[in-house]
């Protein structure tokens, strides 16, 4: 091979190396941005420490505290939303772990506001348990978090963390019993639409958590025991 050929080869190799470096740098930046976005709504405290007046007797390391973001832009589209009188007033966002609040939230009385927030923290708690089972990186677990929150009675629960399986079994029992008014879901003032808390596992878990914080006796036994166990996790 002549000098010209060797020169072209060296130039080509340099270009390939440069392209690889650029691609790797862009991939690194993309992963970094995804990681920051995935935890942008997560605060460096347990919710029980940040808001003890909200979670009452709950003292677990999970749920982690979330940023409360006032945002009226289509709360239904961002995640798992708390409803009052059929109106969405708050929503947990699995993409960045925040809790969004709409205009309807400020119109609620203080006790109803706390109830709605406890419900959204129930979604956050389920996310934390799933994330913990996936290695603790919300960048990689948030898709699974979304999938598992949407489980229904016809879903395969095999991907659920063991801590959540008793809750799924209680959820199935309530669905099969036709207990559509569970936790006061009747569409009347201050309550979600009838059947809302059995629409999927995420809604059942979130409202069960709200009830557990206020009146544990209202929570089905296996779910109550699951919360007692989850409260000990770190």
Image: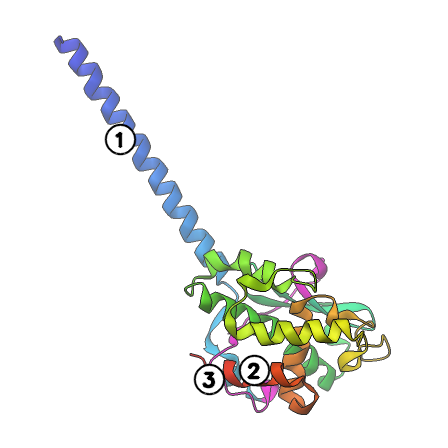
Which is more N-terminal, label 1 or label 2?
Answer: 1
Question: For residue 22, which quarter of the picture?
Answer: top left
Residue behind mark 2: 227
Q: Residue 220 versus residue 122: which sits nearer the camera? A: 220
Name the residue rendered at 77%, 70% in the picture.
Answer: 196
Q: How is the image coloured?
A: rainbow
* Quadrant of the snapshot with the C terminus: bottom left
156 is higher (above) or lower (below) than 125: above
Residue 172 lies within the magenta run: no
Disc 2 and disc 3: Cα gap in Å? Answer: 9 Å
Q: Identify the disc placed on residue 4.
A: none
The residue labelled by disc 3 is: 232
Q: Which of pointers 2 and 1 indicates the residue nearer the eye?
A: 2
Where is residue 226 shown, x and y percent of the image? 56, 81
Neighbourhood count class around disc 1 (C-alpha, 10 Å): few under 14, some 14–19, many 20 upward: few
Q: What's the magenta region? A: 53-80
Mark 1 or mark 3: name the one nearer the start of the chain: 1
Expressed as whole percent of the image width and height from the top left, the position of residue 102 reads 71, 67
Residue underneath mark 1: 17
Contact between labelled residues 1 and 2, with CB atoms less than 8 Å apart: no
132 shown above or below 146: below
Kind of element beneath mark 3:
loop
- Which image quarter is the N terminus in? top left
Circle 1/circle 3 CB separation < 8 Å: no
| Residue 79 picture quarter | bottom right
């Amino acid at each position: 091979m002549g000098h010209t050929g060797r020169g072209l080869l060296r130039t080509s190799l340099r270009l390939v190396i440069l392209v690889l470096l650029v691609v790797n740098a862009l991939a690194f930046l993309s992963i970094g941005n995804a990681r920051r976005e995935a935890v942008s709504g997560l605060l460096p405290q347990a919710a029980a420490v940040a808001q003890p007046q909200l979670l009452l007797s709950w003292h677990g390391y999970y749920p982690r505290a979330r940023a409360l973001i006032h945002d009226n832009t289509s709360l239904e589209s961002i995640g798992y939303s708390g409803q009052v009188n059929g109106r969405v007033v708050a929503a947990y966002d699995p993409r960045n772990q925040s809790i969004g609040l709409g205009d309807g939230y400020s119109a609620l009385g203080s006790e109803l506001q706390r109830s709605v927030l406890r419900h959204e923290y129930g979604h956050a708690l389920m996310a934390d348990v799933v994330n913990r089972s996936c290695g603790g990186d919300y960048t990689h677990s948030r898709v699974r978090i979304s999938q598992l929150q949407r489980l229904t009675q016809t879903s395969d629960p095999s991907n659920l963390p063991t801590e959540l399986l008793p809750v799924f079994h209680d959820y199935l029992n309530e669905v099969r019993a036709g207990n559509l008014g569970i936790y006061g879901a009747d569409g009347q003032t201050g309550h979600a639409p009838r059947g809302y808390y059995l629409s999927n596992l995420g809604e059942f878990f979130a409202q069960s958590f709200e009830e557990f914080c206020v009146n544990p006796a209202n929570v089905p036994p296996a779910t109550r025991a699951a919360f007692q166990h989850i409260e000990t996790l770190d």
